[in-house]
Image (cartoon, rainbow, N blue to C red):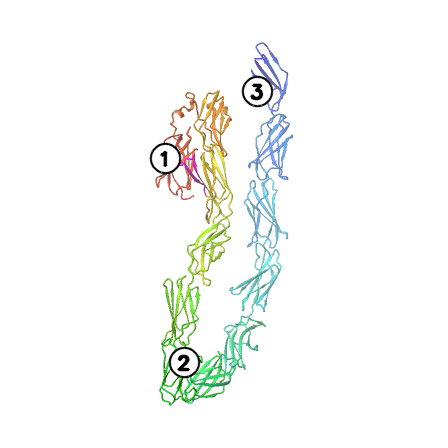
């Protein structure tokens, strides 16, 4: 008390002085020497006297450590730091700051410190500070040091198989001046290489050795960062290769001696002319070469293999395979001698040939020949033989030739008998079957040379058209495809006389009667007319006049008709036979078989014995008509219209008559389906293919063919089917064919669709303020598909203004997040699409949100500085309003309320601002506050009463693909900006409302010039637009 000022004096033990003077109760002592202890006295002084205090001691801050040195301890990899002692220090703190942001601290009471936890391969800045019980000095100057190089990473070693060179590779790392690779083989071989790159070659490695490799990263000081790995060299070449023929299987057994380093072996056989190659492999020292070609000499060599390399080819061995089977084998039957002669093409590789003939009874005949023919004699009659030929060399037989079928002569038929058919005047001959016969031939001849024959495959046989009253001599013989037998013993047959003459017969087409007329020259009261069909059926009629009508005549018959004067058809009073054929029957047993490939049908029907031709007509339901004329009982119709019901008509024509038509119907091959649609479900990786109905189809077969890989199939009797197991990201060609149960239509034209990825399901938005702007940080979950990129799209309404709409999207990127600058008080919907080469997904379910509110507008107060009520207009989407005191550079909350006003005391309008908040964040502050007239802040007079805002200037317009970034100057007091975008090609104008001082416009048209102007806006007042700045977009993103 009573002091006007104070004088502080400080004296160090070393004689240094410092002092200060102050009217208050504290002052700062300048220029103290570091590390010194000072005696402090305070003198209180006034105009009358001064009084000294007692002495107090104080230590100055310890001195900054000097001569800081750091070195790497090679043995441990640590860093040792040392420095000179600092005056006044009781402890030291050493800090190592890595260039990757890593920091480590070491505390010590001595002038050394060892860092043992520093990361390898980094540059560290090391500094030391000294401390006593109270203070710490500043840090010393930084000392730079590189830690030990890291142990090389990503180290791989592989062989260049062709030249016994090992290649070692590794990842590049910092702080390494060179690398050294050393290789140690179990056979004592050593080699090494050095490199300043990321790979090194070790030439001349010995075969079959497992080398131990060490890779050392060298920094010129400590060379102890070592990686270890193994490398297997190329296997050695197999030796003592031998090959021998396995005659029974025409394969070769190959053997060799084990080769060092081999995991398996590959034996290869190549013909001398190089036309054929085969191989076998084994982990043992032998294997069999199968599928060798006959009559070849093979060069056989062996390769030793491991997982990566194959050895050099071994010395070759040779093997000659068995002779080839004889070719072009033919058999010539020598019927008269009872022998066969077998012949074949020459084969110079064979020593002789062995012929075998095996009969149907199991009997075996053989002959050998060194030429190209061989004859087998004394063959028994009636035998069937299969003949094969082998070629033989050194007791090794070839495969047998293809079998050739032959026969000996058939045996002679026995027990022949005959009888006369008087109606047809033909002879029926019977006999016992003969071994080896395929057919029989009967020959009848009378003395004047007239003859008649018949041929059949079995007994009996009808010899037709014999003369009346004539003696015939008959014999028969058996035949097969090669020979005929001797003919049987002869036998005779006498035909009866024919007294009645002038017989005439007549019938009408498709009538069941035949009219028979004759001359009545015999004195008899009754005539009998008999007709015998070609199937031996009989019909007859009686008449006492000169005509008679045969009834129940059948169609499609050959009839022989006689007239006799008694019921005995073989009596002398009979006519010679007259022949007639009736009209063909209606074709029966009609079958229709579809010809799928020709889009047609094959129609067959029963054979008519009297028809000489057939006519077929098929008429489709669409009017298509197809005709066919044929001499046989079948016809093929091609190129019918698909999916049509055809009516079929078939008639048979004889000499003068045509049958009634046979009618039926059939349906042609189904048409290929049309109207394909496909619905792909990305969640189940399935697709539902649908189509329109195809007439006549009972089933459908669908196909989904990817651009690569195997097709997927489904089938269904309905008009859709499901494919499972689609691969996301693949593009498929979908097609379908229709089936009627027998034929399939052609496949429809393909429908190409991609198995596009599903859209993301979990969307997240986080609002973050950067500077004066709010950004929406969007993210989403990944999609399980290959090569996926994402497109985020945001649409919204700014300040609930229907004329202020926003729609913006990201770029297509593989990452799962994107940032959008967002205007305040905006309700928005976020969707994300996923896409790849297969196409683009539908948008995801929308994430609906709102942005941070805009700053409250029209902020004003009533009252005075001691007591005031601050009020403002509502801000859209705001839930809370906060008033802050910003005096003295602070930011102190005065009031937080959900309402639109707040009472304040000690109010300073020049140091107050208001914000609006919701769950997404807090708006920028509004510090524009108005009050009662005459009390408004001077700095806002121009703003309030003169709304003449400054026009902004466009600073930068830059183009990136189809997006343009526009940046402009900030205008004081502006609450928003209006950006005008004009498309010069269409002279169309788009207007954007922006809160900040930049904007990014996306999805513009390629190679188009756009011009940009910006105006500042506050409430209802807007400045003139700035000068236009124009840019042209690129060709694509």
Of discs 1 and 2, which sits in the foreground?
2
Q: Is residue 253 above or below residue 306?
A: below
Dot 1 alpha-carbon crowd within 10 angstroms: few under 14, some 14 to 19, many 20 or more: some
C-alpha separation, residue under disc 1 versus residue under disc 2:
113 Å
The numbered dot on residue 1028 is 1
C-alpha separation, residue under disc 3 versus residue under disc 1:
61 Å
Residue 237 is one of the magenta-drawn residues: no
Q: Look at the numbered disc 3 and give the secondary structure of its residue.
A: loop
Q: Which of the two residues, 598 or 154, is positioned nearer the viewer here?
A: 598
Q: Which residue is mark 2?
A: 559
Boundaries of the magenta span = 795-811
Of discs 3 and 2, which sits in the foreground?
2
Q: Position of residue 81 (x, y in %)?
A: 61, 33
The numbered dot on residue 28 is 3
Q: Quadrant of the C terminus?
A: top left
Q: Is residue 544 above or below residue 952?
A: below
Q: Position of residue 402 (x, y in %)?
A: 52, 72
Q: Quadrant of the N terminus?
A: top right
Looking at this view, name the residue that lies furthest to the top.
48
The answer to whether residue 37 of the structure is visible from this angle is no
* Marks 3 and 2, the one that precedes in the sequence: 3
């Amino acid at each position: 008390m009573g002091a006007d000022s104070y004088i502080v004096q400080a004296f160090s033990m070393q004689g240094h002085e410092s002092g200060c003077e102050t009217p208050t109760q504290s002052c700062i002592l300048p220029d103290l020497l570091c590390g010194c202890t000072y005696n402090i006295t305070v003198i209180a002084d006034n105009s009358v006297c001064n009084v000294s205090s007692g002495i107090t001691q104080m230590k100055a801050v310890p001195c900054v450590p000097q001569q800081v040195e750091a070195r790497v301890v090679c043995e441990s990899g640590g860093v040792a730091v040392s420095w000179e002692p600092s005056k006044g220090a009781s402890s030291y703190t050493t800090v190592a700051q890595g260039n990757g942001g890593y920091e480590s601290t070491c505390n010590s009471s001595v002038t050394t410190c060892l860092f043992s936890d520093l990361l390898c391969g980094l540059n560290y800045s090391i500094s030391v500070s000294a401390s006593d019980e109270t203070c710490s000095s500043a840090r010393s100057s930084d000392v730079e040091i590189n830690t030990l190089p890291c142990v090389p990473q990503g180290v791989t070693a592989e062989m260049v198989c062709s030249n016994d060179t090992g290649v070692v590779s590794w990842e590049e790392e910092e702080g390494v001046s060179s690398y050294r690779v050393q290789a140690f083989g179990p056979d004592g071989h050593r080699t090494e290489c050095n490199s300043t790159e990321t790979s090194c070659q070790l030439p001349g490695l010995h075969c079959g050795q497992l080398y131990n490799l060490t890779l050392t990263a060298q920094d010129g000081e400590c060379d102890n960062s070592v990686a270890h790995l193994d490398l297997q060299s190329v296997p050695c070449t197999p030796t003592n290769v031998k090959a021998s023929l396995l005659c029974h299987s025409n394969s070769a057994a190959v053997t060799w001696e084990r080769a060092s380093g081999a995991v398996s072996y590959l034996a290869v056989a190549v013909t001398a002319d190089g036309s054929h190659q085969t191989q076998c492999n084994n982990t043992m020292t032998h294997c069999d070469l199968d599928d060798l070609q006959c009559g070849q000499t093979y060069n056989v060599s062996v390769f030793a293999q491991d997982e990566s390399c194959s050895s050099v080819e071994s010395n070759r061995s040779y093997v000659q395979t068995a002779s080839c089977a004889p070719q072009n084998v033919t058999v010539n039957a020598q019927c008269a001698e009872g022998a066969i002669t077998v012949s074949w093409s020459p084969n110079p590789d064979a020593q002789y040939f062995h012929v075998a003939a095996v009969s149907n009874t199991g009997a075996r005949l053989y002959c050998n020949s060194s030429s190209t023919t061989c004859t087998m004699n004394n063959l028994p009659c009636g035998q069937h033989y299969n003949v094969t030929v082998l070629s033989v060399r050194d007791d090794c037989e070839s495969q047998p030739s293809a079998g050739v079928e032959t026969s000996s002569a058939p045996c002679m038929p026995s027990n022949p008998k005959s009888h006369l058919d008087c109606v047809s005047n033909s002879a029926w001959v019977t006999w016992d079957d003969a071994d080896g016969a395929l057919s029989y031939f009967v020959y009848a001849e009378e003395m004047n040379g007239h003859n008649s024959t018949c041929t059949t495959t079995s007994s009996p046989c009808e010899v037709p058209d014999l003369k009346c009253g004539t003696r015939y001599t008959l014999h028969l013989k058996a035949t097969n495809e090669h020979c005929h037998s001797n003919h049987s013993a002869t036998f005779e047959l006498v035909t009866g006389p024919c007294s009645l003459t002038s017989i005439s017969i007549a019938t009408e087409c498709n009538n069941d009667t035949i009219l028979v007329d004759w001359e009545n020259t015999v004195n008899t009261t009754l005539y009998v007319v008999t007709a015998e069909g070609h199937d031996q059926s009989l019909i007859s009629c009686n008449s006492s006049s000169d005509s008679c009508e045969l009834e129940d005549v059948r169609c499609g018959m050959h009839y022989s008709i006689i007239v006799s004067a008694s019921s005995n058809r073989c009596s002398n009073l009979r006519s010679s036979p007259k022949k007639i054929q009736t009209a063909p029957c209606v074709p029966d047993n009609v079958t229709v078989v579809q010809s799928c490939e020709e889009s047609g049908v094959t129609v067959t029907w029963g054979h008519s014995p009297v028809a000489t031709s057939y006519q077929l007509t098929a008429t489709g339901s669409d009017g298509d008509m197809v005709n066919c004329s044929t001499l046989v009982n079948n016809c093929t119709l091609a190129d019918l219209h698909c999916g049509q019901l055809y009516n079929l008509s078939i008639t048979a024509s004889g000499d003068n008559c045509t049958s009634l038509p046979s009618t039926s119907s059939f349906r042609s091959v189904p048409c290929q389906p049309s109207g394909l649609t496909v619905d792909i479900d990305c969640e189940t990786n399935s697709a539902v293919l649908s189509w329109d109905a195809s007439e006549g189809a009972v089933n459908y077969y669908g196909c989904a063919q990817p651009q690569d890989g195997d097709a997927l199939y489904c089938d269904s009797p309905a008009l859709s089917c499901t494919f499972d197991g689609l691969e996301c990201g693949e593009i498929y060609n979908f097609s379908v064919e229709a089936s009627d149960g027998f034929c399939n239509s052609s496949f429809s034209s393909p429908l190409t669709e991609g198995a596009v990825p599903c859209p993301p399901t979990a969307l997240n938005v986080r609002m973050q303020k950067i500077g004066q702007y709010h950004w929406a940080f969007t993210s989403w979950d990944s999609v399980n598909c290959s090569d996926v990129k994402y497109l985020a799209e945001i649409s919204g309404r700014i300040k609930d203004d229907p004329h202020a709409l926003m729609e913006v999207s990201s770029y297509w990127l593989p990452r799962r997040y994107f940032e959008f600058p967002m205007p305040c008080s905006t309700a928005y919907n976020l969707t994300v699409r996923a896409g790849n080469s297969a196409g683009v997904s539908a948008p995801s379910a929308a994430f609906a949100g709102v942005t941070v509110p805009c700053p409250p507008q029209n902020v004003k107060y009533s009252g005075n500085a001691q007591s005031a009520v601050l009020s403002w207009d509502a801000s859209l989407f705001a839930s809370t309003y906060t008033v802050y005191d910003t005096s003295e550079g602070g930011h102190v909350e005065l009031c937080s309320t959900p309402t639109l006003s707040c009472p304040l005391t000690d109010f300073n309008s020049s140091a107050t601002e208001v914000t609006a908040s919701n769950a997404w964040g807090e708006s920028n502050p509004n510090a524009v506050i108005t009050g009662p007239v005459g009390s408004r802040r001077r700095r806002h007079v121009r703003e309030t009463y003169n709304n003449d805002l400054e026009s902004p200037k466009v600073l930068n317009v830059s183009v990136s693909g189809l997006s343009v970034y526009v940046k402009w100057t900030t205008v004081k007091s502006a609450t928003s900006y209006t950006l005008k975008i004009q498309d010069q090609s269409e002279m169309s104008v788009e207007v954007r409302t922006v809160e900040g001082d930049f904007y990014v416009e996306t999805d513009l048209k390629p190679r188009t010039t756009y011009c940009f102007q910006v105006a500042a806006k506050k409430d209802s007042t807007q400045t003139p637009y700035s000068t236009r700045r124009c840019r042209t977009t690129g060709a694509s993103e």
